[in-house]
Structures are given as structure tokens and as C-alpha cells.
Amino acid sequence: MSSDDAYQAVVPLDRLRDETPVVEQVGGRSIAIFAHDDRVYAVDNRCPHMGFPLSEGTVEDGLLTCHWHHARFELACGDTLDPWADDVQTFPVAIRDGTVFVDPDPEPDVPPATHWRNRLADSLQQNLDLVAAKAIIHLDDLGEGFDTPLSTALDFGVTYRSMGWGSGLTTLGAMANLYDDVAHDEKLRAMYVGVTAVADDCAGEPPRFPQYELGNAALSKSRLKSWFRQTCEVRDSDGAQRCLRTAASVLPPADVVEILLAAATDHLYLNASHTLDFANKAVETLDHVGWDRADDVLASTVDQFTDATRSEERSQWRQPVDVAQLCFDAHDALPGLVAAGEGRTWDRPDDFVETLLQADPDAIVDALRDAIRSGATAEQLTRAVALAATRRVAQFGTSNEFSDWNTVHHTFSYANAAHALAARTDAAAAYRPCFDGAMSVYLDRFLNSPPAPLPEPGESDRDPAAIRDDLLGTFDEQGRVDDAGALVGEHFDADGAVTELQQTLAEGLLREDAGFHELQHLEAAIRQAEFAATPAERRLSLVAAARYLAAHFPTRREREQTFTIARRLFRGEKLHGSEATPDGTV
């Protein structure tokens, strides 16, 4: 309820009746006042959709219609009939001695944070990108820029997609991981990309109807692990869900990771890398939101196990060399290999990654087996395989078919997931993806024939900022793959800050209509750069990422246009008329 002294005189009632609507600046707001059906109404003159003056709209039968996109608003309370538009702010009106008074600062019906949380949910339900961008920008301003978008989208994604965890939630997890590594504007874009990816992945899909956990909370890890693997083996999604939900409810995270890793590697390179990568992203997302939600989140990944393609059933893993059998034999030998390496310490030889890149699969497997006997940990070996996979990307020959970029990318994302999961458990199963990943690196060898040359280390006296600007410029033109890699190398030569280089790569990524794989790739590349033992390893990771991104850019940048509109609306800028001169900046 407004107090009497909150009202300000705005227009004589007779004038309003003759000239309706009238626009007045009141308390710093542009307010449109309408006389309609013997009553007076006041609304914010900016359409909540894209800021068009509502005074240029029309009123009929109690509805105000904006003429730009035809959003309709109920005059008395501002509610819209069109969820994509949002409700318009209304203002209390009083008539005193023939003059219209308006309270320009009424108490909101709901707190702003609640309003924008609700709008974020609307954006997911209706798949409305502009609404998502607005909500994320406002929630950031209200101090909820990370937790609320992540949690809201995660809950929506695991509930409203019958197939469960997919590329949308994986993108969300990747963007959450990237959040701390990017500048402020890119933080907002990262959340926007993650939320809209979930909305798009769920659009038109039936909801999930999850199973319940088993009633016996005393079930052991070994039994739940055995049951989960058995149900996955026979593609029993319902049974696997019940086992995994129970494990997530009663076991510590490390034990749950062990169960996931075992089932994900009972068969080779499931879903061409996606099963292991998606499971890892689900686990990493739980690190952000809390493991108390593990039952719902992890249960949503089950179809990635039970419905997965199994690479040992693919001809390239069987002919002309049966690399699948090499992997299975190595898996069977793991108990003895690990036992032989107990108490020993292994340091990776300088030529070990080169060994993983050679064209002899038997020699590759032998090198891995020897390393385990010598005390190599699964984390060490998955890191080495990730380096070999990075080389395949960094030296990808652009004479190959464009789709083959995805082939080397999948191997890299698999190796990155294997490395991340190996850091969470000491189970012998953590060694399995070393062999699977190494064989995928081997199968990718022809995509480095001939290998694209890596930029040689040297010296540069150029300003690193200028080099980063040039790097962004490579994303503005098609085909500048080698230029992008060379500029990353030059940035290292000029002693530029790695954090600023990573932020530039993220800026280039997030302004594009980047696909799932590009978003995956940079997040994984930055993670692998963090584990680099030498500057050369860090350089390799970012050279590879820059080449991969440059191969896929530029795009139409439609997503960036939508985000820019939301940002300009937040700032109160005009998007129409002679004063609207959008320059693409935010």
C-alpha cells in the first residue's frame, strides 16, 4: 500500500482523457498513463520484452498490446498473456482535484531475486533464450550469478528429459567448470550457454520417471557394484537406476565413482567417448552443487551405460588389428600388474608420449603395462594418454574431412574424463581407460598424416595483448587454423600470461554459436593445461584448443546477439528508433 506522500502529480485528468496515453518522467521513470473504460492506469513505458514504448501500443478491452512484437498486458496489474514478454511494471494511481497522481516507487509484489528465479525457470520450460539471458544478468547483479542458474538448470535437466543426462547437462557442467577461469562478462555468457543448452536439449522431450533406491541401506559396495555392472551388461535401465540410486544414497563419493568407472569401462570406448565423459561431468557438477543430490543426478546418466554403443563391436577396433582384444587382455592382467607395481614409484620417461603416438599397438600396450608394473598410477597414465590425444588435435591435418575434427576431439575428451576420474579413486578399473584411450589415439593416427607442424618456441617482443587481439581476429575468418595455433605459440614466446590467454580463448568461444564439442574442448583443454608439468605441455594444450576452435569459427553469432540485447536492456539502453545504435558491445 502506497502512502499518500509517495504520490506525485503527473497530468490533469481532462488532458489525459483527451490525449491518452500521456508519457511522463516520474521519479526517474518513464511512465505511460492511460485513460480506459472510465479508469486510469499507469505502466512502465518500456515493454519488458525489448523496451519498445508501450505508449505507442494500443488498448482494447483492458489489454495493452505492444506494436513491436505484439506482447499483450492486462492494464490493471501488468500481467502478460505471453510468457516470453514478462509482466510489465504497474504503478498505483490516485485522482485528486482533477489531477492524476502516480506512486513511481511501489513495493514490488515479489522480491526481485524471486522474480528472476521464476523467470529463469520460465526460460527453461518455454526454451526462451532471451528470457534466460535477462534472468542470468539480473541474478548476477543480485549476487546469484553462479549457484542459482546452475542448480535450476540441473534440476530441470534431470527431471524433464526422458533419456536423462545428455549434451545439455554436460555443457552446463563444462560451463560451471569454466566459470572461475574467465572474465566477468564471460561468466555470464557461460551460464547463459549452459542454461540454454539444457533448455534446448529438453525441448519437446517427455519427462523422466525415475526409479526409487532399494530399501536395504546396508548393501555393500561390492554387491551394488556387481549388480550395477550386471544390469548395465544386459541393458536393464530400470534395474541399473535402482542400484545406482542406492549406491549414491548410502556410499561415499569415491566408492560411487569406482562403481561408475567400472561399468563405464566393462566395454570399450562406450558411445564413442560420451559415456565416460558424461559420467565425469555429472560427478564434477555434483562437486559444485553438493553430493546430497547424487541420487537424482547420477541416476539420470544410466541410459548412457545401458543404451551405449560398444566399440569392440565396431570393425575398426577389430580389423585389421584386433585392438579390442589387446585392451581386454590388458584389463584382465590389471590385478597382477598393479600388484607388481605396489610400493614402486614411476616417473614418466621423456619419450613415453611419443611411444603412445607410434603406429604399433602392441608396443603401445606393452609400454602401458610396463609402466603399471613399475608403479605408475592411473592418474599418471591417463595424463600421458591425454597428452598424446592433445597432440592428435594440435597436429590435425586440415586436408582431412572436416568431420574428422570430431574424431580427434572425442579421443581427447575421453582421455580428459579418464584423467579426472582417476584422480578420485585408487581402484584398478581406473587403469582401463588408459588402454582404451591409447588405442583410440592409435586409431586416429592417419589424421596426423602428415602431421601439421607445431609452432616452434622462439622469442617475440610483441605486446601479448596485441597477440591476443590478433588471435580473436582469426576467429572472424574461416580457415585460419594454423594462424590461431601460431599466435598461441607467439603468446608464450612473448611471456604473455596464460590466464589472460585462456580468457581470450573463452571470449572467442562464448561469443560464437559454439557447438557442444567446441564448448567441451576448451573446458577440457584448460583443465589439462592446469596439470601441465612443463611450459611445453601447457603450450601444446592451448595450441590444440586454438586450432580446434578456429576450425569451427566464425558462426552467425545469433546467441551473442540475444545476449547483447538482454545486456542493453539491463542497462536501460534503447533498441529501436534513431537513438538505437547497437554496436555489438556489452
Image: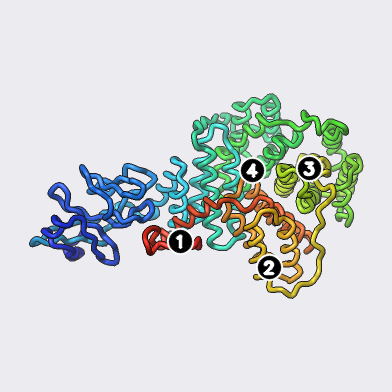
Q: Mark 3, mark 2: which one is toward the viewer? A: 2
Q: Alpha-carbon distance for marks 1 and 3?
A: 47 Å
Q: Which residue is mark 3?
A: 437
Q: Is residue 406 visible?
A: yes
* Residue that badge 1 annotates: 582
Please state the horizontal and vertical placement of residue 77, each as a whole percent of the image.
25, 48
Looking at this view, name the residue that lies furthest to the front.
578
Is residue 428 visible in the rendered structure shown here?
A: no
> Does the residue at mark 3 contact the one at mark 4 (Cβ under 8 Å)?
no
SS at mark 4?
loop
Mark 3 to mark 2: distance in Å? 34 Å
Q: Quadrant of residue 350?
A: bottom right
- Which residue does the image show at 44% across and 48% down from the upper left? 120
Q: Which residue is mark 2?
A: 467
Residue type at the position of mark 1: Pro
Mark 4 nearby-residue class (10 Å; few <14, some 14–19, many ≥20): few
At x 91%, y 39%, the residue is 362
Q: Amino acid at mark 3?
A: Gly
| Contact (Cβ within 8 Å) of mark 1 with mark 3 | no
Cα–Cα gap, marks 3 and 4: 27 Å
**Which of pointers 3 and 2 lies earlier in the amino acid sequence?**
3
The answer to whether residue 277 is left or right of residue 387 is: left
Rounded to the nearest whole Å, what is the CA distance between mark 2 and mark 1?
Answer: 27 Å
Name the residue carrying label 4.
Answer: 252
Q: Disc 1 and disc 4: Cα gap in Å?
A: 52 Å
- Check disc 1 and report its element: helix, strand or loop: loop
Looking at the rendered structure, the secondary structure element under dot 3 is: helix
Q: Between marks 4 and 2, how big is the CA–CA gap?
A: 47 Å
Q: Earlier in the sequence, mark 2 or mark 1?
A: 2
Q: Which mark is residue 232?
A: none
Q: Nearer the viewer, residue 580 or 347?
A: 580
